[in-house]
Amino acid sequence: MTETPTTIPAPVPPPHPESVGVPYPTLRVKDTAPKARSLWGDAWDIMRSRPLFWIALALMLLFVVMAAFPQLFTSKDPRSCFLINSRQPPSWGAIFGYDFQGCDIYARTIYGARASILVGTLTATVTAIFGSILGTLAAYFGGWVDMLISRIADVFFAIPLLLGGIIIMYSIPTAPDSPYLFVVFKVVFALSILGWPAIFRLMRSSVLQTKPNDYVQAARALGSSPLHVVGSHILPNSMAPVIVVSTIDLGGYIAAEATLSFLGIGLQAPTISWGIAISHASALGYIRQAPHMLMFPAAFLCLTVLSFIMLGEVVRDALDPKLR
């Protein structure tokens, strides 16, 4: 009988004395998995690559700083007026010239940014918050809640903004010695009560699109409260259109305030605003005799409105996947 030869393994050489206790090097596999992306992260990458975004942001920051700290731009008192300087053209001492009361137009233009931008910012914020809350409630609960809020919104939506603002401003009289904030909040109230239905409709449609998604249904199936579902899942995925439209509307509200002030029913003197300056400069004979009275406040107003509208357009293009 033939015996099968036995294979004897080769002897393992002993480890080198200097390598005793030294672990073998481990190979690390580089993690090539792509990083998680978010809607706002993609939007930021798109916005910062566009020159229009930086131009609009620079202009917006300039006017905001001008409204918050006007002393950084001029040392003159905007209420220091001398009739001897009435309607004087621009010069080295007054680069924008003087108005009909002899006030420095440059100083009044700088200080006028505060009231105009404050009205626009507060109005856009109030309409965004109020409209978003009502739109979320109407879309999430539906039924009679949706019907009631929608019909109320339709009533206010049917009233033109400027016409309704004129009626509201006339209905709330303003005394000559009224506080500054009262006059500002009066204009904010008049514009907000007529501007929230547009945000309500937008937010309602956005929530109706987000509500049937699987992650919302899963959260509801797990027993999450309506407040948790709305705050953690629905609102973060529904606010993008509201932010875009509110940014664009902010410029429109600044223009609406200037229009009401131009008609003499918005902000009242001694409050300083661009609308009041344009109203005074538009008097009979002033446009032809002293065009600088109208040109500079109107230019600042146009640039401010344009900066906010441009910023809103860039944000809209970045957040809307259909426009990428």
Image (spheres, helix red, strand yellow):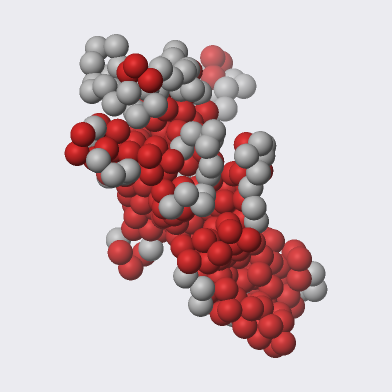
Tell me residue 199's x, y (percent).
53, 66
* Image x and y of residue 228, in percent: 75, 64
Left or right of residue 202, residue 228 in this image: right
| Residue at x-position 80% and y-position 73% | 223
From the viewer's perspective, is residue 185 above or below residue 64? Answer: below
Which of these two is toward me, 45 or 109? Answer: 109
Question: Residue at position x 43%, y 41% from top?
Answer: 276
- Residue 183 screen position, x and y as percent: 61, 44
The answer to which image quadrant residue 60 occupies is top left
Asked if residue 151 is positioned above or below residue 54 in the image, the reply reads below
Residue 300 x, y percent position in the rendering: 33, 37
- The answer to which image quadrant residue 285 occupies is top left
281 left or right of 265?
left
Q: From the viewer's perspective, is 170 left or right of 309?
A: right
- Residue at the spot x=76%, y=71% of the render? 226
Which of the 4 quarters of the picture holds residue 66? top left
Q: Is residue 52 above or below residue 233?
A: above
Q: Nearer the viewer, residue 178 or 259?
A: 178
Q: Is residue 203 visible?
A: no
Looking at the image, residue 56 lies above or below residue 191: above
Rendered-image quadrant of the C terminus: bottom left
Q: Give me the residue at 46% from left, 28% from top.
A: 111
Q: Nearer the viewer, residue 70 or 163?
A: 163
Q: How many marks?
A: 0
Front residue of 80/48: it is 80
